[in-house]
Image (cartoon, rainbow, N blue to C red):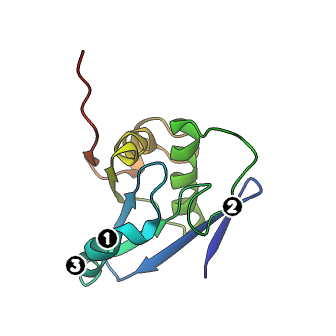
C-alpha cells in the first residue's frame, strides 16, 4: 500500500492507468475507495491518482481536531509532488470541490500554473 509522507503525516494513495494525470478529491470523511467506478472508467485513458484525506481511510489521523481546506489542498498538492506530477486534471466532490479549487488556485505546495485549465468540481450549494 503506497503512502506519501507529508510533514509527518502518512497519506495513502493509489495510482492506476497511464496518460494525463487526474486527481479526484473527496469530501471530508469519504475514503478514496468511493471513486472506484470513476477510476474503472478513467484509468484506461488517464493516470488516476486517488488518495485518502488526512484522518480518513488508510491515511494517518493527526491530533488536530479540524482540517482547514487550505491544509487539505496542500496535502493533495503534496501527493502530486511526491509522484513528481507537474500538471494534472483536478476533480472534486462535495468538500473536495472546495479543496480542488484551493489546490489549483492557492496551494503553497503546488502552483496554479501546474493545474489543467479548469478544475472540475461538484460542491454543495449554499443559499441565504
User: In terms of depth relative to the viewer, which is nearer, 115 or 51?
Assistant: 51
Image coordinates for residue 113, horizontal then vertical, percent: 39, 45
Q: Mark 3 = which residue?
A: 41
Secondary structure at badge 1 equals loop
Residue 60 disc label: 2
Q: Quadrant of the N terminus?
A: bottom right
Judged from the image, the secondary structure of the residue bearing numbered disc 2 is loop
Q: Could you say which is closer to the camera, residue 36 or residue 24?
A: 36
- The residue depicted at 54 percent of the width and 46 percent of the height is 72
Image depth: mark 1 or mark 3 in front: 3
CA distance separating discs 3 and 2: 28 Å
Q: Which residue is mark 1?
A: 20
The tag earlier along the polypeptide, 1 or 3, is: 1
Q: Is residue 37 left or right of residue 26?
A: left
Q: CA distance from mark 2 to mark 1?
A: 28 Å
Toward the viewer: 50 or 128? 128
**Which quadrant of the rendered structure holds the C terminus?**
top left
Amino acid at each position: 500500500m503506497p503512502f506519501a509522507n507529508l510533514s509527518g503525516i502518512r497519506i495513502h494513495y493509489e495510482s492506476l492507468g497511464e496518460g494525463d494525470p487526474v486527481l479526484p478529491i473527496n469530501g471530508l470523511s469519504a475514503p478514496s475507495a468511493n471513486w472506484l467506478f470513476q477510476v474503472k472508467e478513467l484509468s484506461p485513458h488517464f493516470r488516476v491518482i486517488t488518495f485518502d484525506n488526512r484522518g480518513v481511510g488508510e491515511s494517518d489521523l493527526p491530533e488536530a481536531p479540524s482540517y482547514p481546506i487550505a491544509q487539505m489542498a496542500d496535502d493533495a498538492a503534496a501527493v502530486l509532488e511526491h509522484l513528481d506530477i507537474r500538471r494534472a486534471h483536478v476533480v472534486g466532490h462535495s468538500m473536495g470541490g472546495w479543496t480542488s479549487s484551493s489546490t489549483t488556485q492557492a496551494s503553497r505546495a503546488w502552483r496554479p500554473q501546474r493545474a489543467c485549465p479548469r478544475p472540475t468540481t461538484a460542491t454543495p450549494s449554499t443559499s441565504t
